[in-house]
Amino acid sequence: MKRLFTALGAAALVASAAPAQADDVVTLGASVQLTGATANTGRYYRDAYQLTIDTINAAGGIKVGSKPYKLALQILDNQSDVNLSVRQYVELITADKVNFLLGPFASNFALNDSSIAEKYQIPMVQGGGASTQIYTRNYKYIFGTLPPADDYYVSTIEMFGKLDPKPQTAALVAADDSFDVSVAAGTRKHLAAAGIKIVVDQTYREGGTDFSSILTQIKAANVDAILWAGHETEALNFIRQMKGLAVSPKDYYGFTVGVPTEDFRHALGKDADYTFGMTSWLPSADLKDRWFGDAADFATAYEKKFSYAPDYHAASGAADVETFAYAIEKAGSLDPKAVRDAIAAISFDSLYAAPTKFGGNGQIVLPQIVIQVQSGALKTIFTDKFIDKPLYPIPAWDKRG
Amino acid sequence: MVLAQILFNGILLGGLYGLMALGMALVWGVLNIVNLAHGAMIMLGGYIVFCLFQYAHVDPFAALPIAMLVMFGVGFLLQYCLLNLIVRSALLNTLLITFGLDVVITYMAQLIFTADFRAINPPYAGANFSVFGLTVPLIRLAAFLIALVLAGALWALLNLMPLGRAIRATSQNLTAARLYGVDPRSVYAITFGIGAALAGAAGGLYGMISNLTPYIGASLTAKSFVIAIIGGLNNPFNVILGGLVVGIAESLAALYLGPTYTDAISFGLLVLVLVVRPPRSLRAA
């Protein structure tokens, strides 16, 4: 009998101790692609979330009112399955009782998952989805740190105007998912405004591996430029098949994603050279940050801890965590509505963007920086002016040394 | 000209498709196992060639036979130690266990190789030449020829050699084969091993044409399944022919309907074949 009482007493002690400890922690929940087809991009979010939370905690955490809190991360693996990720966000809110939500990777995930945030009125700040479809539904609880997909090619097309020869005809190739449909729709508009004629306009099924039919049509049309929107694995296939079928546009070919990552250059080797791409972020010392010092320090710390270099996905994920840190301190409470209002009004300098702030629809506005691979290294080519010299026009495959 | 080039692309692609499906059709025909881990085995073959090329600097085409040998061993052991236990049970059981194998192989591959994209990129990966105005990518042509050679070798094995007779006998009449001294456990294991070796070769070629991640398996299994049914399980050359049909249909669909519809076309073909073909030919091996 005595033993039973001791056990009960111990249980009561544990029960009373647990919530007291939980009181000092703000938990951010996320469902991210840790396995499955897009796991190699999903890891940027897991690692950036963890590094940022650890760094904030090491500096003493955050203050809600006058009370100090630590941040905690509750992360689930959605196995690159949209339906599973939706269920996991429900689980994070209803069973795990996380305080706030960080996002998954990719637009089609964010598009669906944000509906859960909206339904339960828990703010979600996500850095993985750029499609404007996410922000056109009058949702109040979704915020995003990737710039609008429609405008991904704006800086590239602006650069075309300052290049000699200026491309006159273009092929537009895009995958059929939410992000790339947005990119294609925006790019059609911007190309028309710049007086560049689209002579091949093709959409392919997301995850497609064979581009020989599209490439044959592009080759026959003899275009000046290829503007491409899709995912990294498809970009790799596209470039390799371009070479195999000897498809060389006269001036330019560029990709929305892939080019900034280390993975891309490793997989292609010399064939990555001359490829144009874009990024919303570069690890520059000009981007000052409250916790990391600046973006260059962030990149160093990140690479030291995870043994691979961060790209804009990681920086965007770090900015999402910082958004919550600033917003919670500003709201002085953990009430979801108060924090949501604080996020909507926030403006702060971070390692990702100066200032980091959200438009009325919840999405950040940031220009894309045009980049190019030159002799295996990434060069910054154009923002609103030229920075490094582009290798232009891109030489044909058989004319390279 | 565009049409001719696209038809030609389809034929070259179809050869590789056929090779992918060859191992699956063989195992299905002889063992009556629909191997859902077939795509994962293609993936493994790709990684073997990738590792030999990247770390031991073996030419990828020279690495193909090594990958086939390793995959034969993997397939043989899998069948001998595991699948032989369930080989004569209900179809659902074999589906379940090969599905489980697929998951295990895929996630082991992510642990070992990470989810990074890998490409087998020898210096001549993008080499090509022109014939009558057609651009011929060298590696795709080689893949097509290797597919034909392997299909021929499989045909010769099944029809001209004692081992092949034992394999066919086991699939046609198990009792009679046993009476003649055939040990079905070994024959099954050898057959599955050959299927895995063919998958290994297909994987190496796939890695040279496309790129590898641990997750390519599922879609390759689906494609192999479609081709095995269209080609039938009887004759290796029919499987290659099935691959050509799918390759050409996909390329033409990409031209006339738009690339979004390529999968709709190959699975549409599957439905069509199932409706039109007498089902008996599906059961025969």
Image (spheres, rainbow, N blue to C red):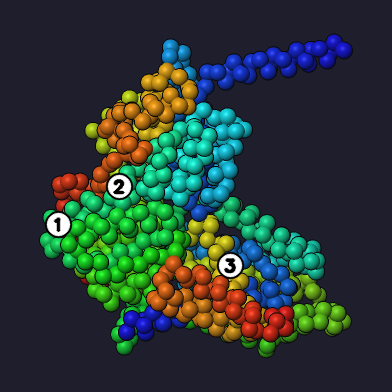
Q: Is residue A168 left or right of residue B111?
A: left
Mark 2 lies on residue: A279
Q: Is residue A112 left or right of residue A327?
A: right
Q: Residue at x 58, y 67 (%)?
A: B222
Q: Earlier in the sequence, mark 2 or mark 1?
A: 1
What subunit carries mark 2? A
Q: Residue at x 81, y 12 (%)?
A: A5
| Residues under numbered marks 2 and 1 in contact, where contact means CB atoms less than 8 Å apart | no
Which amino acid type is shown beneath numbered disc 3?
A: Ala
Mark 3 vs mark 1: give the one in front. 1
Residue B100 higher or lower than B176, as above or below: above
Under circle 3, the secondary element is helix
What subunit carries mark 1? A
Q: Quadrant of residue A61?
A: top left
Q: Is residue A149 left or right of residue A158?
A: right
- 3D distance between C-alphas at marks 2 and 3: 35 Å
Query: In x, y percent, where is residue B71?
Result: 61, 66
Mark 3 lies on residue: B222
Closest to the observer: A305 or A71?
A71
Under circle 2, the secondary element is strand
Disc 2 crowd, CA 10 A, few/some/many (<14, 14-19, 20+): many
Whether residue A393 is visible to the viewer of this picture, yes or no, is no
How many numbered marks, from 0 up? 3
Disc 1 crowd, CA 10 A, few/some/many (<14, 14-19, 20+): some
Same chain check for tags 2 and 3: no
Whether residue A222 is visible to the viewer of this picture, yes or no, is yes
